[in-house]
Structures are given as structure tokens and as C-alpha cells.
């Protein structure tokens, strides 16, 4: 498969269009599904099967996002504590599903932890220490976009940890996770699985899309070269850290949209949430005072209306 191969170019184009669909989707807070699939532009030009697939995707996504809102309200009402880990290869789609989960939720209840590489001080700490401060309090959900499993993946493959640190991680992580569960935190772990060919395609898509080139770091490119090393590291990680208290769940992620729907559907099934009663909201009348006069805004600080 080469960038100039017609089939590859076609698939890259479809991947780029899918990314634009994602951005369109994130902006559609107040537009109807019918307006989306029958409106102007590239969406309307799709063939009938594509239109039906897209319509079904949005219908299911919006329905399950409504269920996520109910789940959020239940978490707050019951004081439940949830940690969700998202792991997988570069370009596996972790960020996309995280966006769809958090899109309509309260960021004070459901927040994302995406930690950078440890600094010099953090490298001398207990390995799990920098993650602890991000754990939830009662009534909170925390989504880790990569997690302490960096040690079993990138750190192992790239040689950022010693053999002793690697083995100590596998001795410690089951006890660490059991401790979290005993403390009342529900821990859910997802691995997003894509094929060698699909990662290659997505990397080519990022190279050819100027809006996504920033996503390709030197570490990403090196991970592509070391595909087999990452595969071995992943297999060892799943085998040694799949525990009853916090099992791994593998999401088949070659198809991005199906992966999002399947992951969210599975996540909703992991908690016995139910719809909670909310107080009736009554908009109070605005107070008006005869002695109040609204002052005009100085024109020099008004943003020009170009559009």
C-alpha cells in the first residue's frame, strides 16, 4: 500500500472526510438529524447507503449521549466514583470516543486526564503518584487518555524504564487497582485495537491533512516502525493485568464510528444507573429598574463583524 495507489488515495480521502464529519458532529448542538443528512454540501452528495449509515450513526450517538446524561445525573446523586482508562496504539481512535462521551456532559462531573511525559521530579516519585491527584471524588467520572499503562507500553518499547522498573510495575499494578476498587472507585479499562494496515492508513491521512499533521510526533513515527514490539508489549500487558476487579475490554476500532458506538454502549452497561428525579426548573422574571440605563459599548473594543 503506497500513498499513490488509487485505492489507498480513495481510503485516505474517506478518512479525511470522516474527520470533517467528526468536526461537523461536534458543532451540531442545535441542528436536527434530518437537516444534517439532507442539507447542502458533501454530506448530501453521499450515496443512499452512506446516507443511511450516517443517519443511523448519528441517531444512535445522540440517543446514547442522552443516556450518558442520565448516567452523569445518577453518578452525582449516588456519589459514585468512576475511572475509565483508554489505551491503544497511536491513531486508534481513543480521543474520538472520549470527545463523544464528554461532549454533552458537565466538565465539573466528567473530566479528562491526559498527562504529559513526566518531568525530572516526577521521575523520582512513586510511579503511580502523579496519577493519584487526578482520581475522582464522590460524584465524579475521570477519563484517562492514556494512563499508568504507559510503563507497559511506550516506556517498555522505547527503553524509558529499566527491566527492574518494568517488572515492579507488573507486581504493583494489580494491587494498586485492587486498592482503588476497595476504596469505592469503579475502574473500567478499554484497549482500542486496530490493524497494522489501518494504522498505516490513518498515519498517511494525517500526513496528507494539514489540519492533522500536528498529531504526528517523532514518537508516533517511531511507534509505527516498532509495530511488532508494541504488539508483544500489549499482549504481555493484557495477560498480566487482566484481573477480576478491573478486567480489560477490547474495542475493535478499525471502523471509527462503530468503535465509538460499541464503546459507549458497553460503558452504559457497566453501571446500574437509572433516571433520577430533577427539580422543576422555573425561569425567574428579570428585574427591571427605572434608574438603570445601559451604557453603549465603545466601538473600538467591538470585534469587527466580518461574517
Image: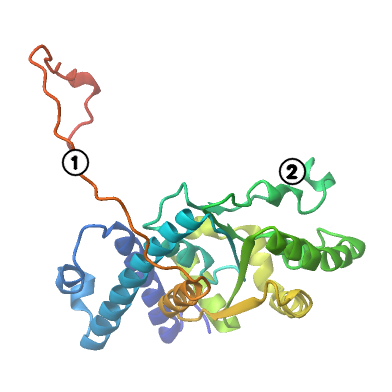
Foreground residue among 301 and 260: 260
Which residue is at a point 33% across and 66% down the rendered structure image?
66
Point out the residue furthest to the top here. 291
Q: Please, what secondary structure does the residue beneath circle 1 have?
A: loop
Position of residue 244 in the picture relative to residue 170 (left or right):
left
The spot of residue 246 in percent (x, y) is: 68, 72
Please tell me whether residue 111 is drawn above or below residue 258 in the rendered image: above
* Residue 177, picture quadrant: bottom right
- SS of the residue at dot 2? loop
Q: Give coordinates of residue 15: x percent, y percent.
A: 41, 74
Q: What color scheme is it?
A: rainbow
Closer to the chain start, of discs 2 and 1, is 2
Q: Is residue 130 above or below residue 198?
A: above
Mark 1: give few (<14), some (14-19) or many (20+) Cα within 10 Å. few
- For image coordinates 74% across by 43% down, the residue present is 119
Circle 2 residue: 119
**Front in this rendered view, residue 254 or 178:** 178
185 with respect to 158 (left or right): left
Q: CA distance from mark 2 to mark 1?
A: 49 Å
The residue to which callout 1 is attached is: 283
Amino acid at each position: 500500500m503506497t500513498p499513490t495507489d488509487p485505492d489507498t488515495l480513495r481510503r485516505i480521502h474517506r478518512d479525511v472526510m470522516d474527520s470533517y464529519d467528526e468536526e461537523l458532529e461536534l458543532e451540531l448542538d442545535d441542528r436536527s438529524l434530518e437537516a444534517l443528512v439532507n442539507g447542502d454540501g458533501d454530506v448530501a452528495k453521499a450515496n443512499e447507503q452512506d446516507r443511511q449509515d450516517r443517519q443511523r450513526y448519528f441517531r444512535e450517538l445522540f440517543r446514547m449521549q442522552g443516556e450518558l446524561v442520565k448516567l452523569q445525573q445518577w453518578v452525582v446523586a449516588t456519589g459514585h466514583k468512576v475511572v475509565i482508562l483508554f489505551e491503544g496504539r497511536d491513531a486508534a481512535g481513543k480521543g474520538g470516543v472520549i470527545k463523544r462521551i464528554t461532549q454533552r456532559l458537565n466538565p465539573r462531573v466528567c473530566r479528562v486526564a491526559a498527562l504529559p511525559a513526566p518531568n525530572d521530579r516526577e521521575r523520582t516519585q512513586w510511579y503511580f503518584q502523579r496519577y493519584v491527584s487526578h482520581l475522582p471524588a464522590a460524584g465524579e467520572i475521570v477519563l484517562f487518555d492514556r494512563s499508568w499503562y504507559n510503563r507497559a507500553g511506550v516506556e517498555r518499547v522505547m527503553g524509558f524504564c529499566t527491566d527492574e522498573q518494568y517488572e515492579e510495575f507488573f507486581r504493583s499494578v494489580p494491587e494498586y487497582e485492587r486498592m482503588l476498587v476497595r476504596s469505592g472507585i469503579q475502574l473500567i479499562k478499554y484497549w482500542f485495537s486496530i490493524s497494522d494496515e489501518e494504522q498505516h492508513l490513518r498515519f498517511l491521512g494525517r500526513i496528507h491533512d494539514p489540519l492533522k499533521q500536528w498529531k504526528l510526533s517523532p514518537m508516533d513515527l517511531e511507534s509505527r516502525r516498532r509495530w511488532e514490539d508494541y504488539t508483544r508489549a500489549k499482549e504481555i500487558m493484557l495477560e498480566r493485568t487482566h484481573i477480576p476487579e478491573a478486567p480489560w475490554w477490547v474495542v475493535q476500532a478499525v471502523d471509527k464510528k462503530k468503535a465509538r458506538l460499541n464503546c459507549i454502549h458497553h460503558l452504559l452497561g457497566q453501571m446500574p444507573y437509572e433516571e433520577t428525579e430533577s427539580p422543576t426548573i422555573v425561569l425567574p422574571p428579570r428585574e427591571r429598574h427605572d434608574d438603570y440605563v445601559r451604557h453603549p459599548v465603545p466601538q473600538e473594543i467591538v470585534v469587527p463583524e466580518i461574517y
